[in-house]
Structures are given as structure tokens and as C-alpha cells.
Amino acid sequence: MSTPLRDQKNFRVAWLFLLPNFLGFLIFGLVPLLLSLAGSFTTWSLRPAVPLQFVGFTNYIELFRDRNFYFYLYNTAYLMLGLPVAIAGALTLAVLLNQRLNFKQPRYRPGLALAAAVVGVGSAAMLWVSGAPSLAYILLALGVLSTLGFLFGSVSYRTFFYLPHFTAGAATILLWTQLYNPNFGLINQTLRQVYDFFGVTWEVPGWLTSTKSLLGFLPLPAHFNNGGFGLGAREAIMLMGVWGAIGGNTMLLYLAGLSNIPPDLYEAADIDGASSWQRFWHITFPQLAPTTFFVTIMGVIGGLQGGFEQARLMTQGGPAGTTTTISYYIYTQGFERLDLGYGAAVAWVLFVMILVLTLANWKFGSRRMSD
Amino acid sequence: MRLLLTSILSALVLLTIIAQWLKPAPPQDGKTPLVWVSDNNPERQRQITTFNQLHPDLRLNLDPNNTGLQKVIVQSSSGVGPDLCDSYSAGQLQTLVDTGIAWDITEPAAAQGFAMADKVWPGAAAEISYNGRQYSYPCNVNVDILIYNKNIFDRFGVPYPRADMTWDEFVTVAKQVTRLEQGGRDAVYGVTGLSWLHFFAAERGEFFSPDGTRLLMQGTPLRAAFQRHHDLLHVHRVSPTSLDITTMSGQGGWGAGNINLFADGRFAMVTIGKWVLIRLRGAHADQLKRLARWEANPARNPAERPVVLRLGSVPLPCLPGRSPSYLVGSRSAVVNARSTRRTDAVQFLKYLSGPEYSRLINEGVDALPGNPAHVNLGLREGVPDLAELEMHSNTVAAIQSGFGFRKSPFLLTSDVERLLKDAVNRMETSPTLPVTELLADVERSLIGLMQRNLNRDPALRARYRELTGTADVAAAHREPAP
Amino acid sequence: MLLWQELKTLLRHLVMITLAIMMVVPFLWMVGTSFKPHSEVERPALLPEQAQPENYAIVLRRAPDPYTQRFLDLDFPKWYFNSLFVAAWVTALQVLTSCMAAYAFSRIEWRWRDKLFFLYLSTMMIPGLVLMLPNYQIMVKLGLVNTYLGLILPAAFSAFGTFLMRQFMLGIPKSYDEAAEIDGANHLQIFLDVILPLARPGMITLTIFTFMGNFQSFFWPLVMVKDDHLRTIPIGLLSFQSQYGQQTELIMAATVMNIVPLIILFVTMQKQLVAGIQLGGVKG
């Protein structure tokens, strides 16, 4: 069927479809991209006094000599350890949400909803009167959650899981900064009570003020500011990221993917008497491969560029640089040190790394999908 | 699908029509518009209205921003910057000058009568000038004082801090009011807000040699200041780690949560500027409401009587045998050199030095006005519990001994601040790390950055060579400064 | 047996509820904080000791700030309209252009297709920060600074959306197009009548992503907007932050008001998503 004439026609049609997007891509994507690439070989600076000169690979050479660059790269990679957890969590949530949530007996649904509402409101009211308003508040919320859950099933749960996404931005940053306050934050206050209850005298984590990390037992170079083994700023940011990501876009993508799996595959498995784990492992997971592929690629791209907002608003890249990621480093180099050429060079080194990872992912992913 | 696309499109068109209809018509009053990029707060609107009343031919508008410079830099370097913007520190001013944004207003300021030589607190000169040239005028001027919570001192039976303490005596006092053994909700720390910077100021330290060519990271003042900071946290244990203090230049404003915690009685003392009254007045009002509610309750429990804040203040301590010296901070307004309306914008700086604005500053209990002549205009007693007038007079007393650090043309002060902040964090988290080693590390990194600046700018390199005889920064540091 | 199944369903609900409460607790904190007076914001308690519902009125300029007795200088409804307006246009344009581009990348065979697609992908691999200044200078050249168009256009064409839609469309069997082609449909008809309806779950997913993402976007509007009447919510929230700290309780009140309509929108979209997926799923 493939004739030169047809090829030409296809080419024309394809470009008609592509044109609107391509124009935008050209002006707002490719042109700035090439400008920044060119800039990385010059003395591109925000100081007018610095003459714009071509300096070849100087920026890149300085960058590879900059020992902090490796530290920040390590931080970036470390924060990305949250990625598999987030993806696995999102997948789990999606699979859970996709299970049958309506009762066979139609009366159970309103009945349980009513029961949840009554128990929730009732116990909340009792606690309120007896002077425990915070607990009452949580129980009330629990009552409302379960009532909505029993009534509307999956739609309510999805909305609850997606809630962190609505509140992104300044509010989330404020929220977590306060939760993590080592002396007075909710998390450590709770931890202290738990420790007291079990009679242990452990030290509570320093969270955003600590340079400890779970990989702190490794013999890292001195300028990595290793605070030893424990929970520190990086874990705090990772935890916050996972909390936001689990119920977010990844979960939605998995849900969309799950509903595209032909039901007859499961019927066949049921006839064979497969366990639910076998069903997941031999049908669900392979069928979701395209979604996993997409999510992984986007996760790697986003992860290597990540950590900027958190560093800028929560920690200023500290303590001792432990939450400075490559993207925050680009920001400080470009907009604080005014050295845009150097910042661009960092960005392009990052680009090459992402490109290599994505290509590997692509090769690996395509092979898995064609299996 | 076609129906869906059409309906979405028509909805969008409808929205666009509404948007056009909502768009305010540009005012046709012949006034010259001025845009001022600054952070927003409830006082700003009054300040702007007063300016517009004083200058009927101008119309000043606020364009709110965070306290970062990115917005101004991106806009200005693309030629569409605001007419006026704020500099929050001497370091930011240097950045604004180096990016060519800040206009040298030395001559207009002299002509209009708001020159830094006689119309600005001498201690604030470093905040508004660079290489002896004036680039801005203060919107407010701040110097930290020691504010203490009288309730806590009374509760523990400790005498209030004296005005002429040394830092060593201060530590003794702080230890007496630190109660950590109860833990959890009842813990009281001696002090918050205190950092190496206060000790460094007391030593009258500098980051650079007089000609700006050499870094003084390994000098005695900085080492001593770091050591004191270290001991405060790890030996005396009177202060929680200062991550939120060292990020005071952060986007969320000054050490966000600590002020409320101080008002709540979790810290006995705080080293801070008198502007904190803006926040403490609110906390005090809330506490009074809480008290009224408690008193209205017939079944009230005397043990649960809400505490109402009572404050006192003294100037910060000094070092034995040394005259006091304090670091001055300022938010100052800069005129954009590339603005076509920059001569009109200068009127705003003149306004900042005038009586009307100074009155507003004092009424709003924001630090001090930039012009010493108007320091007491519009001053009120305020809330007696908070001893507002005492704070004011202590601030005025302290600013007489105020100063600002020297800048170097070869390195941005913000680079020094960032690396020192990292070093402080390292010290806080690794108590065993020797201070000398930390500072040697900082110096090495900064030498690298200075070298990079020289490599990129031939004129700068020539100047450095002229001053030191070499363009190799590391080599220059191996021989003592003149 | 039936009872056992019902119990299993109940158990699933309980697991869901446990997970949901974990995701929702911070939100509860946010709602609680929005009712706190300023001096209680740092206390870890979820609820205020002394509720101050005026926070909402303050944000809406129905009440003065309790500490200064002055009305704040802000226009929350206008911010809201602007955010909605910009996000709606961005979403519509992005979904449309992404679908069209994805169609070209997935359903038509042509030379350099996959190479060009990888070029598209590669623009996502460079941190947006370094593109900001060149991008901004282009906007200055186009005269779009401080306009709605300046907020909408740069966000309206996305490599991400193209990638997402391409993946979705790759999953639609080739036989659909071929059948339509035999019936004499041209590419435009195939796109509108065959592929788009089948790609509906993808479109809705992209709509949600784009809308939510754009609603929160901060940096670009920050440098792009100069006038009051163009401010979006994230920029407007700066009115509660100053040199001397932030009014957390007002930020939270504004955020709560901000997200309630978003939740409603999300729930309706979700219903669409479920319906759309079943449509695609049965035939697939």
C-alpha cells in the first residue's frame, strides 16, 4: 500500500494536523531551547558589564570540576527514590479502587452510609461535649468520608485521594512546614506521645532541620554534609512528594488504563481458577505496561528536574545544601549569581542525563510492551 | 463530539466577552503612572494613597511580589521592568546595581534633598549605597533589639535582662529561663532569633578586606562568632536550631512561625526588630479576647487562666570592653535605571524621606523611618503591655551604634551569605565539626566563585590585578592583604 | 458465601476509608487553620481555640482586618475569574492541539515522524527555568506581556499533552481507521468521529491535568502580570505574604474557597471519565 504518492499525501495531512501545535512548539519550546543551548557556551550573564563572549566548553569544564554539582546530583537522585514508591502506591490505589465496591444486597449501601453518618456525628458530638474537639473533628470527618464512600463508592474515594492536588502551591508548602516543625509540629508532637506511651526515649526526627538521611550510613564524601543515619530534610521532602503523588495524576492514569483491560481476559483467568495475585501479575500488570511506561518516563523527567519549589519555599536548599537539587542549583546560579551561561550548562548536562535515561527506558519499555 | 467542541468554544468566547467587559478602561486623567514592585501588606495602600494625594500629577500603583528578585530581574532585563522596586538587603541592592537595574540617584537625591549624607541614619548607609554612590532610599530601617516576655521571667523568678549586659552574661540569663526538662508542650527555650550574625556584628566584623579583593572568612571575628553560635546550641542549649532564622530572607518572610511561638510563651526572649509589634499586637488582642471569654465562664478553672503577653526590651548585649555595634537592615526603594519615568519615580524616594510617610511608618509600628529627623513623628503609646515606646527608644538608641558590612565589587554579598548559611547549618547538625575547618571550606568555595567572576569580566580582572598584582584569586589570598 | 462476599466488600470500603483519611487529614488542618485567629496558627491543634470565621469575610472584603481595622486591598472574585478564564482557555487549546498532533504522531505514517516526536519529548527534558528568560523576551517582542494572551499562549501547546494523547491513541486498534477509510471517510472525519470519541478517557485525563496544573501555576504569571485586573489566584495570594511573614489563616481561607469549586468540577469530570472509559472498554 505504501506508494510514494500516498506517502506524500500522508505527509501533507500529518503536517496539517501537526501545524497548530508545531507553531507553538517552535516559538515557545524549540527557539528558547536552542537559545539556552547557545547561551551555555557563552558568558551569558544578567550583568550588563560582562561582555557576551563565546567561551567554548568553559562552563561545562567548570561544572565538572564543581564538587557541589555532584552533591546536588546525589540529592536529586536520592529524592527520586520516592518515585517507585509513588508509582507502586498509585498502582495499588488504582487497583483497589477498581475492585467491586457495591454490595450485592442493595439495602446495605444506604444502610451502612446511614450507620456511618450516625456513628460519626454521634461520637463526634460526644467527644466535643467532653472537651476533645480535635478528636471530634477527625471523627466527624471520618463519618462524612465513610458516608460518602458507602454512597458513591469509587468516585468519592478518588476525590479524597486527589485532594492533595487541589491544594498544591503555597498552602501545601505552609502546611508541611508547620507539620514538620521539630519542636512544635503536629508530627513530632504525635511521635513524642507515641514514644511516651511505649516508654522509649528516642530522639524525634529533626525533619527539615536535619542533614540525616536513610542512606546516611554510607561513607559519602565529606562535602555531602552527611548527618548520619536517620530521618532528615530529604526524607521530609520525599514523604511530602509521595503523599501528593500517590493519589494524583499517576493514579488517574492507572485508573484509565485499568478500565481499558478487556474483561474477557479476567473471565478466562477465572475459569482457570487463578488467584487474585496471579490475576494481577499475569493480566493486570502486563496490560498496564503502556501506562507504567508513560508514568515512568514522566516520573524520571519530572524527578530529575524536581525539588525546586520545595527548596525555594521551604528550605532555601538547606540545611547545608542537602535539599538543593539540580533545578534549584540552576536557579541560584542563574538568578542569584546572575550567571545564566553556567545555569544553562547545568541544565544541558541534566538534559543529556534525562535523555539517556529516557532512551534506555524507551528501548526497555518498547521491548517489554512488544513481548 | 462536534457538538461538544462547538459548545466548549462558544462557552470560551462568552467568557472572553465577559473578560473584555470586566477589563477596566485605562484612566484618562493625564496622570503619569508609576509601578512599584513590592511585597504587599495592609499598610501599603495608605502609603500609596498619601503619595498620590501629595503628587496629583502622578499615579502610583503596587505590583505585589514576593521578597525575591526574580520578577524584577526577568522583567527589567527584557526592558519591561517596573519604575520602582524594593531591595530587602544590602546584598539585594548590590545585585540590583550589578544587573544595571538600580539607578545611581546620588545627584537627584542631593538636588531633591534626600541625600544619604544627611537625611539617612548613618548606620543604614551600606543598605542604600555601593562604592560610595546612593542607589535607594529606605522604606524602613531596622535594628534588632532584645525583647523579653516578662511573664516567663516572673514565673521563674529571674530578674529582667539589663541594658548593658555582655554576651556572656546574657547566656547566664538565657540558661535561667530555659526549661526543657518537661519536654513537649511545656518546654521553654531561652531565646530565639539569635545567630552568629549578631555576634559577628558585635565583633564589628567584615567579610572583605578594605579594597574588597580578599575574603576574611578565616579571621578571628567570624570564627569567634561561629563558636558562640555553636556553643549557644550545643553547649548552653538555650536555643533551638536556627534553620528558620537563617532562612529569614526566605519567601515566607522572617522566620515565619517563631513570632507566634514567642507570643505563646515558648521562648523567653527574642532578638528581633521593633516591627514585630505588628504581629504581637494581634497576638495580644487575641489573648485579651481569650481572657474575656475565660472570665465570662462561670465554671472557670483558675489554673487555666489565659496568659496575656507583657513585654520588656533592652538593646542587644555587647562584648566586654567593646563599644556596642549592631547590624542595620533596611527595605529600601530603588528607581529602575531603564524606566522612562525615572525622574518622576524619584519623587517617591523623596516622599519616603518626608514627614507624611515617616508618620505612617510610626503609626504602623514598622521599624523606623529612614530620615532621623522624623524619627518620632506620629509615635503613639500603643499597647501598654507591650511597652511599645520602650522598644522604640531602644531601637533609636541601638541604631546610633549601627553599621552595615562592606561590599566587594568582585563577589556578590549574597554568595557570601548563602555559603555561610550552609556552613551554619553544617555546624548545627554536626556539633563535632571544627569551626575553623568549616570556615576554611567556605573561603575556598568563595575564592572559586570570585575567580569565576574575574574570568568572565575582563574589566573586573584588570581591576583586581591592579589592586593585588595578580588575577589569580587563590594566589592573592596566600599573601596578606595590605 | 454471599455473606462472605459482602464482608469482603465492606473490608474494601474500610481499607479505602483508612487510606482516604490519611490523605484528608492535612486538608482538615487547612480548614481548621482557616478559622484560627493569627496568633493560634502555629499551634498544632487542628481546631482553633477561639474560632474566627471572619477570615473568610476578610478575604472577600466583607470585613476589615481585625488587627489594623482596614479592608485589605484585594479582589478575590476577580482573581478567581482570571484563574478560571486562563485555565479554561489553556485547557481547551492544549487538549485540542495535543489531540491533533497526537493524531499525526500515532495514526498517520510519514517520514521523520518518530524523530520529530522525540524532538518534542526532548523539550520536556530541559528545566523550564532556563527557558524562562528567552521565553519572556519572545513575549516582549510579541507585545504580549501583561495580557491574557501572554498567560494563555505559552501554556497552550504542550509536549506532555501530545505524548499523553499519543499513548492513548496508540492503544486504539488500527482496524477502526481502516473500516472508516473503506467507508470513504477522510482524515478529518476519522479524527473527529472515530478517534476522538475513543480517546475520550485520555482527553478527560488531560483536561484534569492541564486545568489543575494551570490553576496553580505561579512563576509565569508572576513575571507576566503587572496590572491588578490580570492577577490570578496564586499571584493574588501574595497579598497575604509580606516582608514580615504571612497571614497563614487568610491564605488557608482563600485556598479553601479556591478548591471547593475545583472539587465539584473534578467530581463531574470523574463521572464523565467513568462513562467514557466503559464506552472505550467494551469495544476494546
Image (spheres, grey):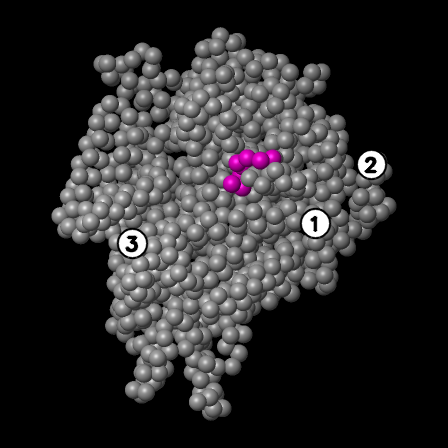
Which tag, 1 or 3, sits closer to the chain's start? 1
Amino acid type for the residue under numbered disc 1: Asp
CA separation, marks 3 and 2? 75 Å
> Which residue is the site of mark 2?
B481
Residue C276 visible, this orientation: no
Quadrant (top left, top right, bottom left, bottom right) of the N terminus of chain B:
bottom left
Q: Is residue C61 left or right of residue B79?
A: left
User: Numbered disc 2: what chain?
Assistant: B
Find the magenta span and give its range.
A228-235
Instruction: Nearest to the eye among marks 1 and 3: give it.
Output: 3
Query: Residue B6: where, in percent of width, then height?
Result: 28, 71
User: Which amino acid, mark 3?
Assistant: Gln
Tell me the residue at 31%/44% (across/down): C15
* Residue B412 location, quadrant: top right
Q: Give the CA separation, mark 1 to mark 2.
A: 27 Å
Q: Which residue is mark 1?
A: A66
Observer-nearest of C262 and C119: C119
Q: What amino acid does circle 2 point to?
A: Ala
| Cβ–Cβ under 8 Å for marks 3 and 2 | no
Q: Quadrant of the C terminus of chain B?
A: top right
Q: Separation of disc 1 and disc 3 at Cα?
A: 52 Å
Q: Tell me residue A329's x, y (percent).
A: 60, 49
SS at badge 3 = loop
Q: Residues within 10 Å of mark 2 (few under 14, many from 20)?
A: some
Near-viewer residue (A131 or B296): A131
Q: Is residue A68 magenta?
A: no
Neighbor class of circle 3 (other Cα within 10 Å; few <14, some 14-19, many 20+) is few
| Chain where mark 3 sits | A
With C257 as the anchor, is B480 left or right in this view? right
Residue annotated with mark 3: A99
Is C273 located above or below residue B210 in the figure? below
Disc assigned to residue A220: none
